[in-house]
Amino acid sequence: MDKLFDYLLRFGRKKNAGEKPKKIWFRSRGLSFVPCAWQGWVFFFIYLAMVIFAAVNANYNSHSVSDTLVSTAFRFLALTAIFYFICWQHKE
C-alpha cells in the first residue's frame, strides 16, 4: 500500500533534469485531445477502427436492438477509457 501511495505522489511531479523528455502525441483541447504527431494519428485511427469493428461485431452477434446497444456501449466505453488514458500519458 505504501508503494502505491508513493507512486501516486510522484506521478504528478516534474521529472528530473537527467530524464528523457516525454514524447507529445496529443494536444489538450478542453476535454478532448487533438493528435499533433504521426504516432497520435496512427493511434487515433487504430482506436477508430476498433470502435467500428466492435459496433459491427456486436450487431452481428445480437438478437435485438437492446442487445446491440448494451454490448456496443460497454465496448465503446472500455475502448474510450483506454484511449483517454493513453492520450493523457502523451499529452503536452
Image (cartoon, grey):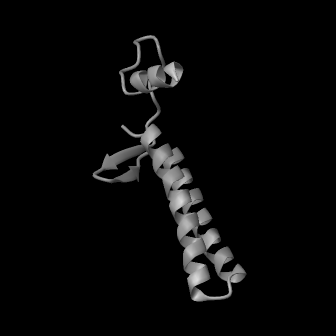
Locate the C terminus by quadrant: top left
Seen at 65% across and 76% down, the residue is: 58
Q: Residue furthest right?
A: 61
Residue 15 appears in view: yes
Q: Residue furthest left?
A: 30
Q: Residue furthest top?
A: 18
Image side of residue 40 versus residue 16, left or right: right
Q: Is residue 72 above or below residue 78?
A: below
Q: Residue 8: give x, y in percent of width and height.
A: 43, 27
Q: Residue 18: give x, y in percent of width and height.
A: 45, 11
Q: How many marks?
A: 0
Q: Is residue 4 above or below residue 86?
A: above
Seen at 55% across and 58% down, the residue is: 78
Q: Residue furthest bottom?
A: 64
Seen at 51% across and 56% down, the residue is: 44
Seen at 52% across and 20% down, the residue is: 3
Residue nearest the observer in this picture, 12 or 64: 64
Q: Residue 46: give x, y in percent of width and height.
A: 59, 57
Residue 41 appears in view: no
